[in-house]
Image: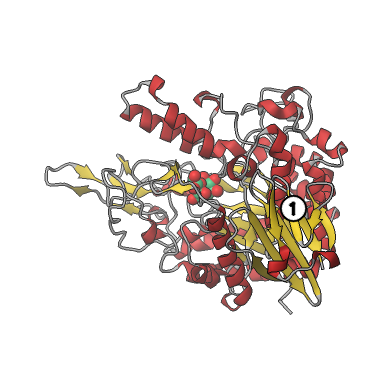
Amino acid sequence: DPHRAWWKEASVYQIYPSSFKDSNGDGLGDIPGIIEKLDYMKCLGIDVVWLSPVYKSPQVDMGYDISDYYNIDPRYGTVKDIETLINGLHCRGMKLVMDLVVNHTSDQHDWFVESKASKNSPKRDWYIWRPAKYDAGGARRPPNNWSSIFGGSAWRWDEHTQEYYLHLFCPEQPDLNWENPAVRAAVYDAMSFWLNKGVDGFRMDVINLISKVPSLPDAPVTLPGEPWQPGTQYYANGPRMHEFLHEMRKEVLDKYDTMTVGEMPWIKEPEEVLKAIGRDREELDMVFQFDIVDMDLGASGKFTKHDWDLKELKGIVNTWQTFMQEHDGWNALFLENHDQPRSVSRFVTDKPELRGYAAKMLATFYALQRGTLYLYQGQELGMSNLPKEWGITEYKDVETLNHWNQVLEERGGNEGNMDDVMEMIQFRARDNSRTPIQWDDSANAGFTTGNPWMRVNDDYKSWNAAQQISDKNSVYNYWRSVLELRKGYKKLFIYGHFKMLTLDNQMVFAYQRTFGGVRAVIVSNFSAEAISWSTEDEGLDLKTAERIMGNYDDSQINDGVLLLRPLECAVFIF
Ligand code: TEU
C-alpha cells in the first residue's frame, strides 16, 4: 500500500488575492474578501487554500517582492485578518498554505536597505554583491553575462557602494545569499512565525534557485546576438540546495504537521525532482514541475511559440506519473496558476460553443491522475484569456511590459509595427490569469464596487459564478463532481496505480487507475472532431462498465467502439 498523507488527498485552490474579491471598494482584492468566499470554496470541495503573497510589499511583482515577512500589506488587510482567515478555514475543515518567497526580497526590505548602506554593513553579505569587471576598452561590465528572467542583465550597479548586486528577477528583487547561515536562520524565524499562527504549510517560490554556483561563471551563449544569457545551469538546483532544504525541514517544518510544495522551474529530470521529495530525503513533499506548462514554449523562450501535439503531452504525463509511482514519489497536478495563461484558451479552445466542454474535459484529463490536485481561481468557472482586441494598456505585469518596451525600443518606438508582439503577448502573458474573478453579472462582475485594478474580462455576463452555481450543467458544478469523485474513491483516484492507454493516439488521451479489483478508465477526446476509439484493443469490455461521469449526457458505445463527440470526456468504472 502506498504511504498515505492528508496532503496527498487534498484538492488545493490557489487564490491570487488582488483579483479574487474586493471587500472595501478600493478596486483590489483583499483578505476580508477571501473570508466572504469561504463557503464558496467549501461547497466546491476544496481542502487547502494556497494564498499567493499578501505580505508587505511595494508590489513591483504583485507581492513576490516582500519588504516585511512579518506583516501584511495594508492593501490586503492585517495580520488579524489572516488569523480570522485561518480560523474560518479550520472551522470548515480546510487548511491554509502561504507563499514563501525567500530566494529574494524586495529592495525595500530593511535587510537590503542595510546591506546596501555600506560595504562594511553587518548585512552586506546577506545579498550577493560583486565588484565590476572592465572590458578592454575600460567600460564597466557586470560580474557575469547572466540575463534576468524579466529581461536585461541580472546585475544592478549600486553607485553608492560601487558594486553590483544579483537579481534573477526584477532589480527591485535582490537575491538573498543563502550561503550565509544568518540569512537562513532569519528565513526559518519568519516561517515559524506563520506556522505558530496556524498556517499549515508553504508553497515555496522558485525554491530551487536558492543555491548558486559560488564562482558565478559566465553562461554559455545559447541565444546568439543577445547581450545576456540564461544562467540557469548555475543557479537552478545548485550545489547546496538539498542541504538547505533538509536543514529547513529539520529546523522548522518537522516541528509541525505541514505540507510543502516547491516551485522548481528549469528542472526536467524526474530523478532530480525525486531528490527533493523522496521520503527518505526529508526535504519537500512535492514540486511544481514545468514540463506541461512549458510545452508550447518556443526555443527562444517565453514569447515564442512551439506547436505541440497530443503525443508530446502524453509523453510528459506518462514520464512523471510512471516515475513517481515507481519511486514512491508524489506529483503536484496543475494546468494553471498566476503565471500561466488560462488552460481552456491555451490547450483547447475558448470559443463560446466549445468552451464548457473544453474546461470539463481538461478537468477530467488531469484531476484524476496520481498526485495532489491544484486548481487556480477562476479555473472552476472556465475563465479564459484576455480578449484578443485588448491593447497593451490593459496589461499590468512587469514581465509583459518589459518585453513590450524592449521590442518597441528595438523597433524604433513605432507602435504601429507591434502586431506580432501583441499576438504573442495575448497568447502567453501572465496577465491572462490575473483578471478579476467573475462572481456575477452585476457591474465589474461583482468583484468590486470601485474601479478594478485590472479590467474585468468582457465575457463576465455569460461566464460567472452566480450563474454557474445555479446551473447543474455548468463547469463549476462539473468541477464539484470531479472533486467529490476524488474523495469518494480515494483509494482508486488518489493512491491507485496509474497506467497510460492508447499512447500512440493523437486525439484520444486515455489512462487507467486501479486499486484492488477496481478499475477506472478516464478518456478524453482532445480534438474538436467526432472520432471513435476501439476499446477492445485495450482489452476493455465496456459492456461491464459503469459510466460515472462525462461532459455529455451519455456515452455512445457501438460494438466495443466508443464514439467520442468533439472534446468529449468520460469516466468508466469496471
Ligand atoms: O515564478 C518563477 C518563474 O520562474 C516562472 O514561473 C516565471 O514567473 C515565468 O516563467 C515567467 O513567465 C515565481 C512566481 O510564481 C512569479 O509570480 C514571480 O514573479 C517569480 O517567482 C519571482 O518571485
Against 290, is 535 above or below?
below
- Pinpoint residue 465: horizontal percent, then vertical percent: 79, 36
Relative depth, front residue between 512 and 542: 542
Residue at the image position 81 percent from the left and 37 percent from the top: 468
Residue 284: horizontal and vertical position, in percent? 59, 67
Q: Quadrant of the C terminus?
A: bottom right
Residue positioned most to the front: 559
Q: Is residue 298 left or right of 69 when viewed as pictured?
A: left
Other-residue count near label 1 (Cα within 10 Å), few / some / many at <14 / 14–19 / ≥20: some
Instruction: Tell me the quarter of the image containing the N terminus.
Output: bottom right
Q: Which residue is mark 1?
A: 563
What's the colour scheme?
secondary structure
Residue 346 on image: x %, y %? 58, 42
Q: Is mark 1 within 8 Å of ligand 1?
A: no
Q: How many marks?
A: 1
> 404 or 200, which is in the foreground?
404
Q: Secondary structure at mark 1?
A: strand
Left or right relative to 354: residue 317:
left
Q: Is residue 497 visible?
A: yes
Q: Residue at x 81, y 76 (%)?
A: 517
Location of residue 453 in the rendering, given as x and y in whole percent from the top left corner: 62, 28
24 on left or right of 404:
right
Name the foreground residue: 74 vs 355: 355
Q: Amino acid at mark 1?
A: Leu
Left or right: 211 as drawn, with respect to 255? left
- Would you place residue 425 above or below residue 137 in this image? above
Up-down relation of residue 414 to residue 367 (above or below):
above
Residue 95 seen: no
